Amino acid sequence: MEGGFWIDYAWPAVLLVIKIVAVIVPVVLAMAWLTYAERKVIAAVQLRKGPNVVGWFGLLQPIADGIKLIFKETVIPSGANKVVFIIAPLMTFVLALVGWAVIPFGTWDGGKIVIADINVGILYLFAISSLGVYGIIMSGWSSNSRYAFLGGLRSAAQMVSYEVSIGFVLITVLLFAGSLNLSAIVEAQRGGFWRWNWLPLFPMFVIFFISALAETNRHPFDLPEAEAELVTGYNVEYSAFTFALFFLGEYMNMILMSAMTTILFMGGWLPPLEVSWLNWIPGPIWLALKISFFLLLFILARAAYPRYRYDQLMRLGWKVFLPLTLVAVVVYAGILLYTDTLPK
Amino acid sequence: MVLQALAFYVFAAVAIAAGIMVVTARNPVHSVLFLILAFFNAAGLFVLMGAEFLAMILVIVYVGAVAVLFLFVVMMLDIDFVELRQGFVKYLPIGGLIGIVLLVELFIVVGGWVTLPETKAAITEPVARQGNISNTAMLGRLLYTKYVYLFQAAGVILFVAMIGAIVLTLRERVGVRRQKAARQIQRRREESVQLVKVKPGEGI
């Protein structure tokens, strides 16, 4: 050991913790005020005022909600499988957070702003999002309630189905980028708005966004918590902070999916024009702006569309998206090979 | 290197403990959950070996898809725990036999390395890292050049198995009304709604 304990282990560990906190805190704050933004935007769509009592324009509403949820009693049903019941919401929340480990936020002095710049970043994100189903299926089963169980089963089937088409969409993006590293995928799109992946991959972009709605169980695919028939589905037995973890996990997943859409199709942290003063604005700000745009789309989709019926949802996933994306992979690969533009 | 060793022992210990729990857990759903934990730790071991692509694929395919189906099936079963315990003595000999066979095989393989050092050379050499190429790219190169026929053959086998599964479970139910999305979209107002001027007191 040449550097000794402090230089070799302790200092990198401290640095890592600082990095993690620097990423997690903004994400958690963004998530808290995303709930506020959603209520305000939907209120505006429906010509209401939305939350406007706590703080200026109701800006402190998320804090009030959080305090309320913390101080309520956590009820564990007597017939529930206690350990699994407690683990399920924790799992949802943690999985929504760990995805941020590989999200690149920009460049600084030639280095990348990212916690872990791993080679298989996109696969890591895909793996994390495919694990999200466990939080829901475990909560549905352990609650020992029929409504929760039905909601959990529905949601598990839904998430597994839409993951398949997301996988194929990822392959088409990889064909253009030639790397599984998220920073490399963003760098491959350098050159302004018209060079970003959304233009050549437009059909895939639309399919990915719709699949992201289904994957995060958002409207119009929010069947797991169909309140009309399942009283709210998998989380019906959860109260107080265990419920809050599910709720926050869903919003965190929305932000993560928006970040993924941004990185894959909208050039990540890159500015829309290759102009020097636009390049001067730091990458994280561009990334945040683009993520906000997609979050707005998430919220507007909720305000605009009615809920899908379950068989229609499955039909869309398996009979429309899966064949389309499968053909698209072949077509895009063929075009790239024919024009000899495959990334080397 | 200390951290690597520590991580290895943590992953390995949790994987083995989870494996034991898979067999001994009373509740089958808990068994599947422990199986998932074992898969996850195996993925961690892959990462430690520098096979990050395999690790991610293990998580995506086994944890994200296969284990979900296991969990689905096990949760749906109506299991009587008392009945489940009854066959223990009856199945103990055959289960023990399989365990012993596996153990002996392991001993033969590992014992061979110790008694005959030259058998170690017969193990396929891992392809050495060539410069700055990532693990994923190397796997791709190897699969699509040296092993391309085997790779394609594996694909064909899986494809045939998939078709077989679909054919076996597909049943045509007659007399069931199905939604035809294309027809619904093509429907026009003229063919479904008729405006009629009705005089008061007369009806149609």
Image (cartoon, helix red, strand yellow):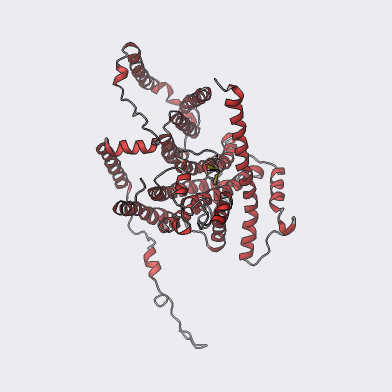
Q: Is residue B61 left or right of residue A29?
A: left
Q: Position of residue A193 (x, y in %)?
A: 48, 58
Task: State which quadrant residue A108 falls in.
Answer: top right
Q: Position of residue B43 (x, y in %)?
A: 45, 32
> Which quadrant of the rendered structure holds the N terminus of chain A?
top right
Could you tell me how many numbered marks the image carries? 0
Residue placed furthest toward the left: B149
Q: Is residue A157 visible?
A: no
Q: Is residue B35 left or right of residue A238?
A: left
Task: State which quadrant residue A303 falls in.
Answer: bottom right
In the rendered image, the vertical position of residue B36 relative to residue A96, given as above or below? above
In the rendered image, the vertical position of residue B96 relative to residue A332, given as above or below? above
Instruction: Choose between A85 and A188: the one closer to the eye.
Output: A188
In the rendered image, the vertical position of residue B81 relative to residue B198, given as above or below? above
Residue placed furthest toward the top: B115
Task: State which quadrant residue A19 falls in.
Answer: top right
| Residue in the image at 58% along x and 42% along y | A93
Q: Is residue A50 left or right of residue A206?
A: right
Q: Position of residue A225 (x, y in %)?
A: 55, 52
Instruction: Choose between A133 and B191: the one closer to the eye.
Output: A133
Q: Is residue B51 visible?
A: yes
In the rendered image, the vertical position of residue A189 relative to residue B198, given as above or below? above
Instruction: Choose between A145 and B36: the one closer to the eye.
Output: B36
Q: Position of residue A74 (x, y in %)?
A: 67, 41
Instruction: Choose between B134 and B124: the one closer to the eye.
Output: B134
| Residue in the image at 43% along x and 23% along y | B88
> Which quadrant of the rendered structure holds the C terminus of chain A?
top left
